[in-house]
């Protein structure tokens, strides 16, 4: 089952030290570290990589359980207390503000608050939150909070995998929170910079943004190192003196590991006779797609959070070890790109080899962050994971507790609901006041549009010739906000000389606090243009490919060409 196992251990690892257990489809990493304010010491480490057949089975609980057992056995790691995590588009993370209130009241209100953002019923999710400080909003100091929620089924699956391997999970975190922990511990001197960590895994990439040392926004992309390998088997490849052939997966993976992403200008060929230029050509579309997603994330983040620019990028994860990737991103993005090194300056306990750590430091970011978890940090299996009202009611369900239980339900619903309702009411008042001015503006713009159309029709026909499609594209782009990503634009009219062209626009709208307003604002902007008429929303669905909330949409409209 295992393709490779690397491990080292010290005698101290037999104690109660927490083990950070990073359970991926490609590999399992177990790390024990002693960290304090002055430094860190790596006490045990084991990394095991699954073979191709195992990886293709996806997240199979039985397969992963055996992978963990083999990893720990070969690494001679006997500790049972582990910290694990959940990741992917199903994990909800948001930074929010709440009115200042005691911790006990906050615990009661947060289950109501999370229901504003997730569609899953409260009894089917687990949640937790962290208060990271205070934030001034409209002249009032409010609590600055990071809220995390995940489907209970997803959390239970990860817990069952670890328990089946004979381990005792003491905490479960979320991938961006773990990366944040590692970032703050290893990048203290850069805490004032706006930084992004791009964690490239086997199948998924997580992009997290840190502002003044706090996680502010995160997004998950379904693209990883495995896509680079697949790109090498997507088309026949030529070798010196041989006919065209398609590479096997293992051959492609070996080529990727050895040569990475060659520069397009690099002369020569591999020992198999495959030119470096050909390898670069095959890999480039995948890396260009990754680059495009990173740029889109940067544009959305800087616009939505009023940040001038991202100053630095840190890449991590096994996929970030691709040779040539760091230079490619730095050149295309025009900024500093650094490979993560969570063990920089670490000491090593007796029996632990520094070589095994140095072989794959960027891929240890997650394991390191898990291993240094503390009991006051976010934990999806903590006491706050479920609505405390439910837990309290269950414990009071004794023969003489019926009346008390009814009173408790009434009290908690009132006290928790009032605080949440007040907060929501303030937002609704502001939204309502802004709508009045917006309605007036729409009426004014509509009147202006009719006047301009009348003026246009007064000009001779010869001055109103057919416009080029590029002009239409440019016009649509002028009305596209930064939180809308256009993906496809098609022209549907049968005649190129028709007075009006029918246009279909496909894209994704991202939003934070103004749910859905991005699309309506986009449609209103097109309607206000002298160029477009008959704006219709013809398709709308939730886009689950991103951590940020988003809607996939299609809009049809008529474009005036005369």
Image (cartoon, rainbow, N blue to C red):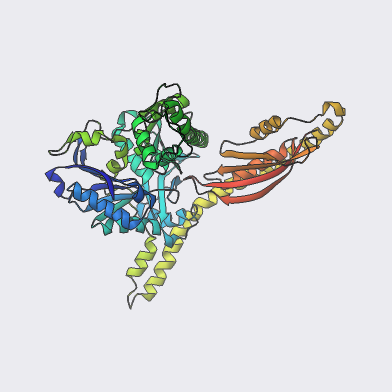
Residue 38 visible in the picture? no
Which of the two residues, 367 or 107, is positioned nearer the viewer here? Answer: 367
Q: Is residue 492 above or below residue 423?
A: above
Q: Position of residue 137 (x, y in %)?
A: 48, 40
Residue 477 visible in rendering:
yes
What is the tally of numbered marks visible in this picture? Answer: 0
The quarter of the picture where the C terminus appears is top right
Residue 38 screen position, x and y as percent: 20, 33
The quarter of the picture where residue 469 lies is: top right
Q: Nearer the viewer, residue 231 or 16?
A: 231
Is residue 34 toward the left or the right of residue 262 in the image? left
Quadrant location of residue 492? top right
271 or 450: nearer the viewer = 271
Q: Is residue 11 left or right of residue 275?
A: left
Q: Is residue 438 above or below residue 242?
A: below
Q: Is residue 301 left or right of residue 157?
A: right
Residue drawn at x 22%, y 30% is 345
Residue 62: horizontal and vertical position, in percent? Answer: 32, 58
Q: Position of residue 280 (x, y in %)?
A: 45, 29
Q: Name the residue at 31% across, 45% down.
A: 27
């Amino acid at each position: 089952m295992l393709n490779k196992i690397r491990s080292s251990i010290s005698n101290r690892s037999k104690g109660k030290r927490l083990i950070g257990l990073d359970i991926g489809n490609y590999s399992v990493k177990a790390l024990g570290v002693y960290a304090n304010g002055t430094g860190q010491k790596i006490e045990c480490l084991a990394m095991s990589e699954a073979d191709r057949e195992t990886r293709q089975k996806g997240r199979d609980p039985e397969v992963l359980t055996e992978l963990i057992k083999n990893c720990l056995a070969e690494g001679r790691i006997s500790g049972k207390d582990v910290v694990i995590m959940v990741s992917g588009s199903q994990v909800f993370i948001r930074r929010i503000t709440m009115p200042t209130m005691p911790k006990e009241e906050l615990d009661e209100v947060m289950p109501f608050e999370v229901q504003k953002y997730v569609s899953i019923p409260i009894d089917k999710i687990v949640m937790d939150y962290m208060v990271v400080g205070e934030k001034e909003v409209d002249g009032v100091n409010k609590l600055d909070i990071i809220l995390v929620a995940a489907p209970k089924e997803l959390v239970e699956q990860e817990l069952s995998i670890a328990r089946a391997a004979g381990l005792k999970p003491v905490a479960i975190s979320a991938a961006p929170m773990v990366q944040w922990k590692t970032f703050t511990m290893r990048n203290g001197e850069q805490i004032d910079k706006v930084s992004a960590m791009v964690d490239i895994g086997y199948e998924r990439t997580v992009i997290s943004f840190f502002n003044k040392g706090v996680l502010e926004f995160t997004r998950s992309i379904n693209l990883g190192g495995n896509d680079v390998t697949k790109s090498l088997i997507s088309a026949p490849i030529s070798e010196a003196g041989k006919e065209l052939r398609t590479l096997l997966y293992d051959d492609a993976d070996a080529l990727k590991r050895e040569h990475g992403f060659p520069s397009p200008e690099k002369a020569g060929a591999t020992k198999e006779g495959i030119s470096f230029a050909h390898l670069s050509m095959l890999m480039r579309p995948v890396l260009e797609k990754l680059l495009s997603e990173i740029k889109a994330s940067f544009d959305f983040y800087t616009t939505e959070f009023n940040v001038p620019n991202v100053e630095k990028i840190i890449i991590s994860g096994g996929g970030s070890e691709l040779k040539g990737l760091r230079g490619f991103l730095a050149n295309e993005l025009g900024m500093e790109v650094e490979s993560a090194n969570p063990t920089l300056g670490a000491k090593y306990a007796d029996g632990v080899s520094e070589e095994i750590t140095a072989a794959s430091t960027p891929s240890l970011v997650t394991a390191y962050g898990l291993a240094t978890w503390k009991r006051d940090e976010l934990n999806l299996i903590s006491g706050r994971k479920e609505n405390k009202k439910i837990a309290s009611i269950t414990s009071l369900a004794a023969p003489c507790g019926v009346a008390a239980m009814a009173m408790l339900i009434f009290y908690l619903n009132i006290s928790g609901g009032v605080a949440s309702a007040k907060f929501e009411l303030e937002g609704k008042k502001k939204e309502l006041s802004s709508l009045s001015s917006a309605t007036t503006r729409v009426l004014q713009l509509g009147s202006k549009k009719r006047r301009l159309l009348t003026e246009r029709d007064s000009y001779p026909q010869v001055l109103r010739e057919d416009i080029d499609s590029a002009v239409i594209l440019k016009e649509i782009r002028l009305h596209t906000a930064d939180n809308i990503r256009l993906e496809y634009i098609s022209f549907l009219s049968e005649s190129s000389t028709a007075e009006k062209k029918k246009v279909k626009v496909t894209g994704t709208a991202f939003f934070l606090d103004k749910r859905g307003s991005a699309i309506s604002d986009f449609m209103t902007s097109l309607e206000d243009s002298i160029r477009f008429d008959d704006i219709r929303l013809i398709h709308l669905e939730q886009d689950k490919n991103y951590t940020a909330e988003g809607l996939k949409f299609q809009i049809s409209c008529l474009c005036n060409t005369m």
